[in-house]
Image: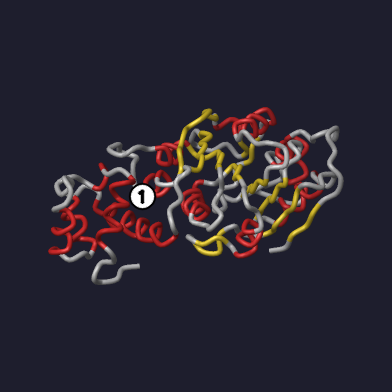
């Protein structure tokens, strides 16, 4: 990855239309990548609305993942934020740098925000560790949304809020509650630390290329309770394992996941949950299990 800062903030620069931007992209042979989930916002009003949804203040520190040619980056920059914009595609990044060259409050990083599926890339992590307080605002591709959100929330300095535009199905999973069909490992991992709400719906006609699905804005705000890293690790391990058998009774799901039958009985004897299913458990109940059970004998990571 490489980083670069731009020049002086300008509030009166004319934004090029999406027709102009598309012509620039096509002139350099750019075609959106399905593997990277590249669907760009066409509507400036929507971009500005998402920034409003994020409830940011002047001087806030903000991470944008997948800035593309800068459709969301520009209205963020105009709010006089300290903005870190990450983009994996060098051609898009070059265009964003050109478009936002007059903004001194934007820093760019070229590369993938994830070094592995569940690990934030070191340059991004280092930049975030320098911030005491920060927020995420992004238009996210479906394929990275879950791993990215969970990975960011497991950093030592996790985001105070996350306002993201995602596919509607992913939005449903993010905000799901226990006992619902969409409640699963992703929901449970986010719900432990964040309040979650679903905002405005977005039609496919507002993207280029047009996706086959609808999208939604989702907002997550950090809960006040602080949970140590060791407890989070145990919680995530239990959640990942028991939701592999979400339809089994909790007793059978834990045994299937590798815990000793006797140990499971000892723990569940202290609860009324033995015959419940993992998909019905609240985050606090899952956290209790994580702290009571310890690692399974097989020491599954």
On the picture, is 7 further left or further right than 96?
right
Q: Do we see residue 229 in this rendering?
A: yes
Image quadrant assignment for residue 172: top left
123 or 74: which is nearer to us? 123
Residue at screen point 37% across, 46% down = 188
Residue at screen point 32% across, 52% down = 287
On the picture, is 299 further left or further right than 82?
left
Residue at screen point 24% across, 53% down = 245
On the picture, is 127 further left or further right than 218?
right
Quarter holding the C terminus?
bottom left
Q: Residues within 10 Å of mark 1 (few under 14, many from 20)?
A: many
Q: How is the image coloured?
A: secondary structure
145 or 162: which is nearer to us? 162
Give SS at disc 1.
Answer: helix
Residue 258: % across, % down: 22, 65
Residue 133: % across, % down: 62, 48
Residue 274: % across, % down: 15, 49
Residue 251: % across, % down: 16, 54
242 or 46: which is nearer to us? 242
| Residue on which the image places disc 1 | 185
Q: Do we see residue 22 in this rendering?
A: no
**Count of numbered tags:** 1
Vertical placement of 199 versus 24: above or below?
above
Quarter holding the N terminus?
bottom right
């Amino acid at each position: 990855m490489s980083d670069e800062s731009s020049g002086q903030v300008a509030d009166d620069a004319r934004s090029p239309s999406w027709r102009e931007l598309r012509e620039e992209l096509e002139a350099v042979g750019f075609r959106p990548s399905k593997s990277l989930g590249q669907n760009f916002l066409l509507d400036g009003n929507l971009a500005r609305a998402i920034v409003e949804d994020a409830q940011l203040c002047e001087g806030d520190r903000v991470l944008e993942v997948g800035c593309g040619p800068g459709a969301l980056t520009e209205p963020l920059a105009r709010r006089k934020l300290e903005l870190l914009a990450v983009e994996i595609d060098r051609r898009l990044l070059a265009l964003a740098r050109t478009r936002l060259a007059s903004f001194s409050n934007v820093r760019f990083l070229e590369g993938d925000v994830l070094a592995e599926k569940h690990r934030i890339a070191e340059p991004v992590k280092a930049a975030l560790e320098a911030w005491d307080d920060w927020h995420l605002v992004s238009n996210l591709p479906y394929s990275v949304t879950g791993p990215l959100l969970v990975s960011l929330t497991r950093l030592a300095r996790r985001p105070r809020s996350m306002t993201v535009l995602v596919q509607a199905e992913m939005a449903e999973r993010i905000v799901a509650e226990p006992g619902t069909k969409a409640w699963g490992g992703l929901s449970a991992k986010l719900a432990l630390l964040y309040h979650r709400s679903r905002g405005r719906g977005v039609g496919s006609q507002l993207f280029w290329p047009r996706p086959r699905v609808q999208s939604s804005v989702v907002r997550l705000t950090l809960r006040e309770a602080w949970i140590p890293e060791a407890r989070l690790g145990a919680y995530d391990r239990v959640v990942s394992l028991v939701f592999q058998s979400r339809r089994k009774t909790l007793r059978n799901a834990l045994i299937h996941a590798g815990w000793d039958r006797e140990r499971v009985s000892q723990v569940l004897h202290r609860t009324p949950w033995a015959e419940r299913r993992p998909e019905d458990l609240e985050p606090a109940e899952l956290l209790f299990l994580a702290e009571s059970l310890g690692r399974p004998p097989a020491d599954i990571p």
